[in-house]
């Protein structure tokens, strides 16, 4: 009990010293901010997002290895940029982070898939927490439950983990692309904005439903593919 209280106090002190708290981090991921990010997409970007979404949903399980490397390269850019900013060089930090994580992800593919499965679970946990209206201070619990669930799925079946993160990313691309295109219509723009901001469950529901359908579709295609295999 004393150890737990010590860890909690250390986390609180570190967040206070950095000036950023966990509720503030999740406040930046509010439905309103996500919607503002979506509506900034141009129609060309929206079409590309839709195309990538379809590829992820249908064929993500066949090209998962390059997708894993790309995902880790992006994670390396953001994490390296943050570490580099602490050391005085965000650009070199982003470059080194991208190179290191992308290089490490290929020989340790199974572990990389597990990490992406856990992150996909975190996103789903956050989406569900947002949809039921949890305050920002409690969103970390939903994310933690999602990470644990996604990690357990990865350890139980790597194929399920692959289908989870590719279907989730495909669903995200499709939601961004379709909603951005619909928002370009002047007659639909006010209605969509009001519906998304007034009903907190709408965007999370639009994200989770195609994810589930994509997993079922990939599972069906995978059963009929004899040459494809992911070591368990």
Image (cartoon, rainbow, N blue to C red):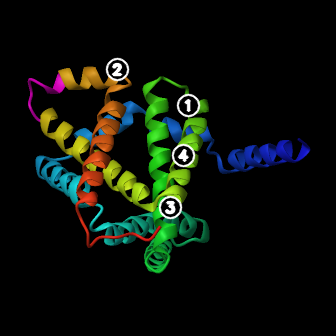
Spatial CA span between label 4 and label 1: 21 Å
> Which of these two is toward me, 65 or 227?
227
Residue that mark 4 sits on? 149
Residue that mark 3 sits on? 114
- For label 1, count other residues whose C-alpha is less than 10 Å away and answer few (under 14), some (14-19) or many (20+): some
Q: Which SS class for mark 4?
A: helix
- Say whether disc 4 or disc 2 marks the residue closer to the N-terminus: 4
- For label 4, count other residues whose C-alpha is less than 10 Å away and answer few (under 14), some (14-19) or many (20+): some
Spatial CA span between label 3 and label 4: 11 Å
- The circle on residue 20 is none
- The circle on residue 199 is 2
Spatial CA span between label 1 and label 3: 27 Å
> Which of these two is toward me, 232 or 191?
232
Spatial CA span between label 2 and label 1: 17 Å
Q: Quadrant of residue 200?
A: top left
Spatial CA span between label 4 and label 2: 26 Å
Spatial CA span between label 3 and label 2: 33 Å
Q: Which residues are magenta?
A: 184-190
> Which of these two is toward me, 82 or 5?
5
Whole-percent x, y for residue 75 in the image: 45, 64
| 16 displayed left or right of 79 | right
Residue at 32 percent of width and 43 percent of height? 211
Q: Is residue 28 visible?
A: no
């Amino acid at each position: 009990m004393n150890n737990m209280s010590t860890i909690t106090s250390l986390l609180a002190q570190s967040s206070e010293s950095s000036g950023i708290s966990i509720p503030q981090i999740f406040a930046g991921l509010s439905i309103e901010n996500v919607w503002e990010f979506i509506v900034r997409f141009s129609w060309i970007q929206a079409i590309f997002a839709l195309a990538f979404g379809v590829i992820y949903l249908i064929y993500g399980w066949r090209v998962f290895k390059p997708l894993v490397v790309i995902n880790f390269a992006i994670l390396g850019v953001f994490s390296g940029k943050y570490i580099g900013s602490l050391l005085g060089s965000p650009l070199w930090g982003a470059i080194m982070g991208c190179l290191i994580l992308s290089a490490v992800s290929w020989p340790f593919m199974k572990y990389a898939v597990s990490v992406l499965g856990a992150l996909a679970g975190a996103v789903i946990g956050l989406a569900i927490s947002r949809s039921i209206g949890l305050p920002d201070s409690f969103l970390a619990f939903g994310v933690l439950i999602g990470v644990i669930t996604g990690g357990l799925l990865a350890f139980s079946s790597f194929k399920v983990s692959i289908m989870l993160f590719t279907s989730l990313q495909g669903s995200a691309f499709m939601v961004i692309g379709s909603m951005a295109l619909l928002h370009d219509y002047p007659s639909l723009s006010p209605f969509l904005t009001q519906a998304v901001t007034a009903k907190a469950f709408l965007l999370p529901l639009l994200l989770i439903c195609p994810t589930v359908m994509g997993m079922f579709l990939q599972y069906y295609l995978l059963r009929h593919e004899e040459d494809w295999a992911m070591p368990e």
